[in-house]
Image (tube, rainbow, N blue to C red):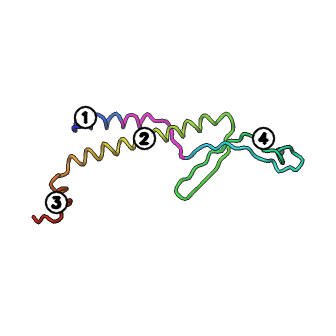
Amino acid sequence: MNKEELNLELQSIKKAIQDNGLPIPGTIHKLYARCGSKTCPCANDDSKRHGPYYRWHYRMGSRQRTIGIDMENIETVQNAINNREKLEALIEKLLSIGIQYIESELDPSLNMSTTNKSKKT
Ligand SMILES: [Zn+2]
């Protein structure tokens, strides 16, 4: 891509990032649980466990959290997770544009001299 094309692509990615919905980290886990009562059918039969329950699990730096999600909010949480995946894909594209743009600015002869160390200048 030439610089004009890179600039057009850059504008379109910036617009897409601006239009991207609210992102969150993490994933949704679906689980079935035992209630703890010895007289409940769930105690001895895996298929009788309670649920499904949904948990949003995420990590931010060293902090890790798991939060229960009620049925009516599963879609909201899943959409925000999808928004993060879209955002990450857009950032990847942005980095690729950055690489192409900056590489085109750099003097290629400098790159030659570092890959051919035996040659004295
Ligand atoms: Zn039970």
Which percent across, then down, holds residue 52? Answer: 72, 39
Amino acid of disc 2:
Ala
Q: In the image, 73: left or right of 108?
A: right
Which sits earlier in the primary sequence, circle 2 or circle 3? 2
Look at the numbered disc 1 and give the secondary structure of its residue: helix
Residue assigned mark 4: 47
Look at the numbered disc 4 and give the secondary structure of its residue: helix
The disc placed on residue 57 is none
Amino acid of disc 4:
Ser
For the residues marked 3 and 4, what is the alpha-carbon distance in whole angstroms? 67 Å
Residue assigned mark 2: 89
Which percent across, then down, holds residue 40? Answer: 87, 45
Which quadrant of the picture is home to ligand 1? Answer: top right
Which percent across, then down, holds residue 21? Answer: 49, 36
Q: Residue at x 59, y 55 (%)?
A: 64
Q: In the image, 18: left or right of 55?
A: left
Task: Give, as a single range, the part of the protein colored magenta.
Answer: 13-25
Task: Bin the neighbour count of mark 1 within 10 Å (Cα to Cα): few under 14, some 14-19, many 20 and up.
Answer: few
The disc placed on residue 5 is 1
